[in-house]
Amino acid sequence: MPYAVTFDVSGDTSVRGAITDASNLESLRRTPPSGAAGLVRRALADQNRIVAALYSEGYYGGTLTITVAGRAPDAPDVFSAIDAARASGPVPVVVRVTSGPRFSFGTIRILDMSGRPLPDPPRPRQLHLVPGEPARASRVLGAEDVIVDRLRDAGHPFARIASKDVVADHANDTLNVTFRVDPGPVATFGPFTVSGTETLEPGFVAARIDIRPGEPFSPERLTALRRRLAGYEIIGSVRFIEARQLNALGQLPIEVQVSERKQRYVGFAATYSNTDGSSANAFWGHRNLFGGGETLRLDAQATWFTEASDAVPDADPFGYNVSATFMKPGIFTANEDLVAKAAVLREVTNAYVRDAVTFLGGVRHRFNNDLTMQVGIDLEASKVEDSTGTADYPIVGVPVDVNFDNTDSLLDASRGVRASATVEPFAYFGNDGAGPVLMKGSISTYHAFDEDKRFILAGRVAAGSIVGATYSDAPPQRLFYVGGGGTLRGYEYQAASPRNDLGIIVGGLSFFTGSLEARLRVTDTIGIVPFFDVGAAFASEWPDFSGLQYAYGIGLRYYTAIGPLRIDVAFPGNPDIAGTNYGIYVSLGQSF
């Protein structure tokens, strides 16, 4: 039954888009319904959908009429009118809407079950129910979650909205809302049970639950526990099932339901860059090697340096990296993990060409949900060719790494701090022998200026130094280099680094970088990010900031369920040093 729908919107015509978006008559017009009855059902359904759309925009005094072939959808003769109209072409359907005035929020009350005001309720701005602002119906529904979450954060696991009264005051064009809240009892955590493990040892998950019975109930603690458990590769998802009632001790028993990912996986990755070189990588991995969450990953990577190396122009541009990475959780207690990586590689850059065998292993200790420290051993036997010739560089170091991260998201943080620091004394450092110490660190911070996280200011600084090494005897591959998407956008890889008299990059004993981004979300899915980067590597033992380079640009973000898709366009402050006039970078997740 083909039809032609017409929308006649009067009053505030800005609501027209919401009306047509809600209408099945409009969205399904290219899919005609089956017969007159199907058209009538579609029109009747639109009555509720369009009224809901008006409410969602704050219009509670509007009027709506829908006619099909000149009749109301529920008129006794509507079917005969449709059949008669069909003989002349598509059946005319008219939707007439008068929006009426837009209502604003008036009185907002939050009461307990006895009718008394709830102690320490969320503020109207936290509820998004600010008096005088448009009274969108969706905000009333969202406020329910805010109230319940506030009470659960205060230790009330069974908090609920018992009822709500939403009254449209047509005399004053306001919407008055009263919530009646049942907080339920204050509770503590009870015993945890685990279900869903298949290949994991039964006690693996239980040993990593650091919440003890008797602790005050806290959703934040559960969120931190979920984040920790989900960090193990074998665990695909974590779900907490809270008991429906407290036990005799006033505690809330909780079931931890986990699902496992497939144990084995294979994959392939490839990258292309006209400045940094290109690569292809094939890998195989196991997420639960011996039943205790042990992981093993084998990688075989082939690389191609697009242009001839400045330091070794006649070098073969092809490189490789074959590596094995192993991690064993709970090497001593549940808070210590053994990590190790061994590799055989050939690396080609503008500054050097390296053939090496490397090993990095250590024990990582978790202090809490935010802070970890790793102590290990760093071994390397390498032959490196640069602009001065070829030399062997044996390396033995003891790196100490500290990482802190209390941000709210790995790929799109809106609050918190992310910091890392490394101190590595060397027992042997190439031709320098024993004594040099490498120090480097970075810190990023994020601040959302509004509750909807539509304007986030993000900043990062990083610096490093090698103390006690002579510039000429230090292994070139362990010097610092700045330039490229990970350090200074808009510059070629390593371009903002010290050079010799021939203009060849030779690396530095220190470096400094900084970035500032204003992350502005224009819509729910689209954002723009103006940014500014600064940085350089220096020949001096400590950053002296001579020759500091900068870049600027703008990025586009498309926000997905797993994180933002990033496209950045950067322009160097000094194209002669940068080696290019611009850089384009695409990845999943923010730049830092």
Image (cartoon, rainbow, N blue to C red):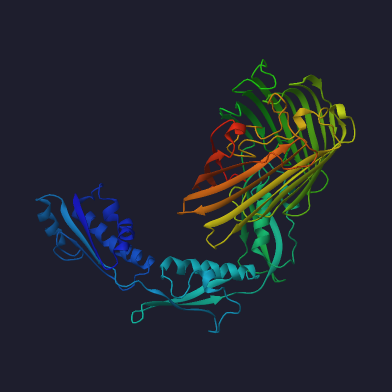
Vertical relation: 543 (above or below) 90: above
Name the residue furthest top: 314
Q: Position of residue 480 (x, y in %)?
A: 73, 35
Task: Say left or right for 366 vs 51.
Answer: right
Q: Nearer the viewer, residue 316 or 146?
A: 316
Residue 257 visible (yes or no):
yes
Q: Position of residue 587 (x, y in %)?
A: 55, 39
Task: Say left or right for 249 vs 591.
Answer: right
**Which residue sits at x=62%, y=62%?**
242
**Which residue sits at x=68%, y=36%?**
482
Residue 1 visible (yes or no):
no
Q: How many numbered circles does the render carry?
A: 0
Q: Nearer the viewer, residue 258 or 10?
A: 10
Vertical relation: 486 (above or below) 68: above
Task: Say left or right for 141 vs 65.
Answer: right
**Which residue sits at x=55%, y=42%?**
588
Vertical relation: 428 (above or below) 159: above
Task: Say left or right for 562 vs 335.
Answer: left
Q: Position of residue 53 (x, y in %)?
A: 35, 63
Q: Quadrant of residue 218?
A: bottom right
Q: Nearer the viewer, residue 233 or 439?
A: 439
**Which residue sits at x=52%, y=45%?**
554
Q: Quadrant of residue 538?
A: top right
Q: Quadrant of residue 176?
A: bottom left
Q: Position of residue 450 (x, y in %)?
A: 54, 62
